[in-house]
Amino acid sequence: MTTADQVNRLESGGRIHREKPLSFTFDGKKMIGYEGDTLASALLANGVSVVARSFKYSRPRGIVGHGAEEPNAIIQLGEGNATVPNLRATQVELYEGLQATAVSGWPNVEFDLMGLIGIFGRLMPPGFYYKTFMRPQRLWMTYEHIIRKAAGLGKAPTEADPDSYDKLNQHCDVLVVGAGPAGLAAALTAARTGARVIIADEQQGFGGSLLASVLSINAQPAAGWVADTIDELKSFDSVQLLPRSTVFGYYDHNFLAILERRSDHVGLTAITGSRQRLHRVRAKQVVLATGAIERPLVFAHNDVPGVMLASSVSTYIQRYAVIPGRTLLLSTTNDGAYQTAIDWHQAGRHVAAIVDSRPQVNGPLIETAKQLGIHVISGHAVIEALGKKRVTGAIIAPINSTGAALTGTPKTLSCDLIASSGGWSPAIHLSSHTGAKPYWDDKKIAFLPGNSRQQEQSAGSANGCWTLQGCLQEGIEVGAAAAQKAGFSPAVDQPVDFHCNEPLQQSPHALFLVPHPKSTSRAPSQFVDLQLDVTAAAIELAAREGYESVEHAKRYTAMGFGTDQGKLGNINGIAILANALGQTISETGTTMFRPAYTPTTFGAIAGRDIGALFDPERYTAMHRWHQEHGATWENVGQWKRPWYFPQQSEHMHEAVNRECLAVRNSVGILDASTLGKIDIQGPDAAEFITRIYTNSYLKLAIGKCRYGVMLKEDGMIFDDGVTACLAENHYLMFTTTGGAAGVLAWLELWQQTEWPDLQVYFTSVTDHWATATVTGPNARKVIAKVCDDIDLSNDNFAFMDWRDGTVAEIKARLFRISFTGELSYEVNVPAHYGRFIWEKLLEAGKEFDITPYGTETMHVLRAEKGFIIVGQDTDGSVTPHDMNMSWVIAKNKTFSFLGKRSLERSDSLRDQRKQLVGLKTREPQQVLPEGAQIVNDQNQLLPMAMQGHVTSSYYSANLGHSIALAVVKGGLNRLGETVYCPLADGRILAAEIVSSVFYDPEGARQHV
Amino acid sequence: MLHIYCPHCQQHREEDEFSYSGEAHIQRPSNPEILTDKDWGDYLFFRKNPRGLHHEMWYHAAGCRRYFNATRDTVSYEIMETYPVGTRPQIAPLPTIGDDAT
């Protein structure tokens, strides 16, 4: 392993740092490259031909392109927790110690068993998903398993990502996408007006095609103009330059997403800071200078390693000093590609011939080539590549002027590299993201960006401009227009003219499928989409089978479905489909591109919103105490609530039984701070609340509370809770913990949109208060020890009253409301006294063995009482009548409260609605699973007639048997009947329908 | 992600701050009790789903907490105007029948 192993490295030139050799491995083999290389250029330098096995046929594949368009060189980077699957080797910058493996091929790409067997291709005609795998359907899982193994997709890491990622929200006047000639010119022009400019490019250096160009701009080498332009851009404070940054999506209202790779070029994981950043940019104006992608020619066995894009060959020579072969054969339809043969020749290697499909060729580039002694064969095309793991030659044949037919005898030329150029396709992906419909231009032989749907303009070759001078000029015009639309006047000292030494070019030839002596269906495979192994024959077959829409043909053949989204193949495929259908390309149209332009890491999209920061966590003022006392947690909305407090080695059910017994026999204490609290004020507050709830609040006296149920207009229960009258025109509404935000929005909705005449104001005060519920027969004795300014007697502070007073010297508000059915005081203090008051109450309750309890005990105790929990026992499809709560509906309110009319709908009145009942299992110790389905006849054959389901189910230590709440069809008239719950494990549990109130049915205990 | 002008805050803000609240200009019947089930059902459940301009309600949930209306193109997602509840749209005006739309 030495630098001398780089058999294809030229002795001079390129934008690489020869003084900085880097060692790396590919499929375990050690190699050397240089700083400035991509993995692809380093592999080519080391003479690597085969980098992948193909998707369906397991054919050997080599590097084709040099950028985002690369379909074959898809690799897995690194291993372990930071491994990255499915990267394009052409876009991976080389660093010391880089480890890459091919994602396809078994046991490896050089010796692939699947390819020898060759069985998968025959199993996979076009439409293979539909034809092969649907019958028999049960085998799909097996097929899928084999396909995934064979398909050569990378492996996602199974461990947590060691890196961190950031997200930035940005605004700018002009966002320029692409830093080639048009993009740089546009950015500079806009920057000079004073506009805030962001310019982003996916490559490590700005310059785009100019980095590999032999042209000059205003008599200076193109690379010099690039350097000067970057320097000037950097001199503006208002300009942000983002290299290694892919604008991967263009979303609504000029919102674009940029993936910036901060550290991928130096190692698998970031040494400092975040690995990647997602820029979320709201731009006033956007310039799309995304360039163009060369279109390969489609001929037989055009997938053999050693068939490459002409521009990519030039790029490897000029930019990386890598010459990927010994003898070049160029197949072209245009003048531009001649430069590749010239570059090759000047690098000192042999050019077998230039094969040009046009009948007559002349012009400066052709003359230059001829003067160099390169053999130019006009009116010919390469019709077939020879070789298996590497090109060994090419068959060429004369072709007619339309490119539709061969006109003479084929002959064979020997070479080890075939460069092809069928012209250029603008990278219209981002324009397409906006919904702009691309249109076909016969003259430019390209789909061009459609009419703008957003504040954007395309410039340069992305807009179908094929000359350097034109691209620069267009960049200036579009950059100036964008700045002006963003509100900036043109700068006075703008340059206007560019002089580039580009040779004049004659018209290119439109050639999408090179004919073969055999018909397309009989010819050796002519690949259109290399990544998914879609051939010209497959597209013609799709057309014959009736897939006439381009969108259908795409899905049927899977053309463009790969990770490259068909960047190379789509236009050829569309043209072949159009030809098969006997229509124009314009009539056939194109498929739409969608984000992302290139694959984007989930890490960057997630950013810091992972782990504990995935969703905010809300803690009560007593949270730390709960933590210190071993609470287990239940997530209720965003709140962390104590679930139960296990002592020593208690299991959950032991802890919950102990807590439940303590409350009913002495006293317990619950942190109820999370309940939603809305402060309601205004002269029309009582009227408003009465319209919202099913019962009336017009006569609720100061010092009193009332429980209410809130319905949506469809009559279904939406929330419940207690509302207290605090003062004249002043109320406090409690909501469920999870429903607080939704209820507030609901109140605002009706006040703002339907009843703006009602004077009433709402303020969320949930976080203002800490609430400790002291409940149980000894609750009054506990409160009496810390509160001496409230008369706690039942006569003067009765059930459903509230009082202001002092608890442990803190101003407090006490509510006698009960969710346990026991004597209860809910002690509310300003939140910052929460822990203090909690500890004072515990101290006061010590002699009664006061027991802190969590949400599980709360649930059991309320279920013993048959109190519903909205969202658990209700699901948005039950009315108060269904919940056996008709008592909560006021009959004689003048205003038709929300949902009232719906309670009279025929569906709300029908028999056999599901109604809330209790269930008592035949085996008292057996606890039904929540969600269990209920049937009447356990012997009924499938499908059984479902009668309802279990909504809440617990073991009740107070009663000594299990209890369950359930909704059962017509259940309220079925008390005493037996129903059955067939479970997934095969057991069938029998239960009796009983009243939903299991404990203290008279409700005496809360009134003492 | 939409960029929405709140007519109350008088600022363009990110969509994150808002929540969608359905079709605008649906008035609650003043006397629901006299409606047939069908008419009440129309008010309850039936909504326009146009291809093109649509008047809809938005809630500035993480902002001023106020509702407002927007005229939005459901094809291009362009928001043509936003206007306070209780006023009428300038674009694609409502038919002038019945009571003042809210």
Image (spheres, coloured by chain):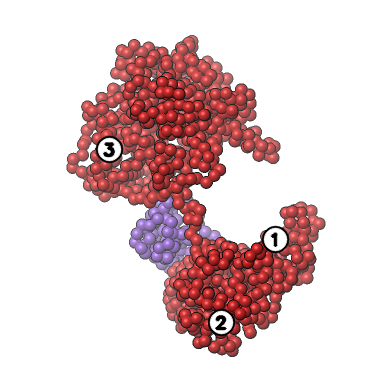
Chain colours: A red, B purple
| Residue at x 45%, y 24% (from the top left corner) | A1
Residue for point 25% across, 38% down: A231
Q: Is residue A295 visible?
A: no
Residue A56 image offset from top left, x and y in percent? 58, 29
Kind of residue at badge 1:
Pro
**Cβ atoms under marks 3 and 1 closer than 8 Å:** no
Residue furthest out toward the right: A939
Q: Earlier in the sequence, mark 2 or mark 1?
A: 2
Q: Residue flagged by tag 3: what amino acid is it?
A: Ile
* Alpha carbons under labels 3 and 1: distance apart: 67 Å
Outermost residue toward the left in this view: A492
Percent across and percent down for residue A36 are: 37, 31
Q: Residues within 10 Å of mark 3 (few under 14, many from 20)?
A: some
Nearer to us in this view, A503 or A192? A192
Residue at image location 44% in from the left, 63% down from the top = B61
Q: Which residue is mark 1?
A: A929
A241 up-or-down from A468: above or below: below
- Between tags 2 and 3, which lies in front? 2
Are marks 2 and 3 in one subunit? yes
Q: Is residue A470 above or below residue B79?
A: above
**Labels 2 and 1 share a subunit:** yes
Residue A783: numbered disc: 2
Q: Position of residue A196 (x, y in %)?
A: 29, 47
Tag 2, which chain?
A: A
Q: CA distance from mark 2 to mark 3?
A: 75 Å
Residue carrying label 3: A230
A193 to the left or right of A709? left
Q: Amino acid at mark 2?
A: Ile
Under circle 1, the secondary element is loop
Q: Which one is in front, B77 or A600?
A: A600
Mark 3 vs mark 1: which is more N-terminal? 3
